Amino acid sequence: MIHDLMKLFYLHYSYQNPSPLKYKKGYWICKDSLSFNNCVSLITLPNNLKVNKDLMLEGCASLIKLPDNLKIGQNLFLSNCVSLKELPDSLKVGRNLYACGCSSLTKLPDKLKINGCLNLGNCVSLTKLPDELEVSNYLMLEGCVSLIKLPDKLKVGDWIYLPEHLK
């Protein structure tokens, strides 16, 4: 797995010297942003990955899971990762999480806290939100046709875009 990931990094970032990824104290660390947008063969990433800025995985159609202990300093872009079914409980996102169009997504971390915006638009398989979900800015739920209800302890700083059936 790690060997395959390193080949992927080499192919994707071969123009950069040195490599944007270093292994230190049990973590794979990227001091900047990582983009694997539209890497349709990407299935997962290594556990204990820390990205100081943005992690971009939009359009990774084969991505089935995110690694345990994934830490993103700023934004996580997962839009149209159609095979992704759940986000790990250990996920930490510093600012915004964009997961619109993740049509297989059914589970979010139990104590998810987003210090920015959470976009779950068109996550058609999502049936519930975590009981203690906190979002500082807006929460986008339009197109979440399987969502049954909003949690009682939901905290949203600005506004919520609801699917039609919950308006």
Image (cartoon, rainbow, N blue to C red):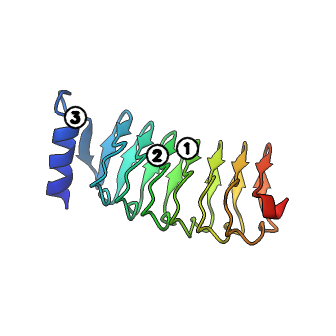
Towards the viewer: 82 or 140: 82
Could you tell me how far apart the alpha carbons at marks 3 and 1 are, in whole angstroms? 24 Å
Amino acid carrying label 1: it is Gly
The image shows residue 43 at horizontal and vertical percentages of 31, 60
Q: Specify the amino acid type for callout 2.
A: Ile
Q: Where's residue 52, x and y in %?
A: 42, 38
Q: Position of residue 66 (x, y in %)?
A: 40, 60
Distance of label 3 from label 2 (alpha carbons) = 19 Å
CB contact under 8 Å: marks 2 and 1: yes
Residue 88 falls left or right of residue 96:
left
Q: In the rendered image of this protein, does residue 36 appear above or below residue 4?
A: above
Residue drawn 31% across the image and 52% down it: 40
Of callouts 3 and 2, the N-terminal one? 3
Residue 27: which disc?
none
> Badge 2: few (under 14), some or many (20 or more) residues near its Cα, within 10 Å?
many
Could you tell me which secondary element the residue under label 1 belongs to? Answer: loop
Determine which of the numbered discs, if any, sits on residue 72 in the image. Answer: 2
Q: Is residue 68 above or below residue 118?
A: below
Side of 8 relative to 112 (left or right): left
- 158 or 37, nearer to the observer: 37
Label 3–label 2 contact, CB within 8 A: no
Q: Which residue is mark 1?
A: 94
Q: Which amino acid, by three-letter code, is at mark 3?
A: Tyr
Q: Quadrant of the C terminus?
A: bottom right
* Relative side of 49 to 137, left or right: left
Which residue is labeled 3 in the image? 13
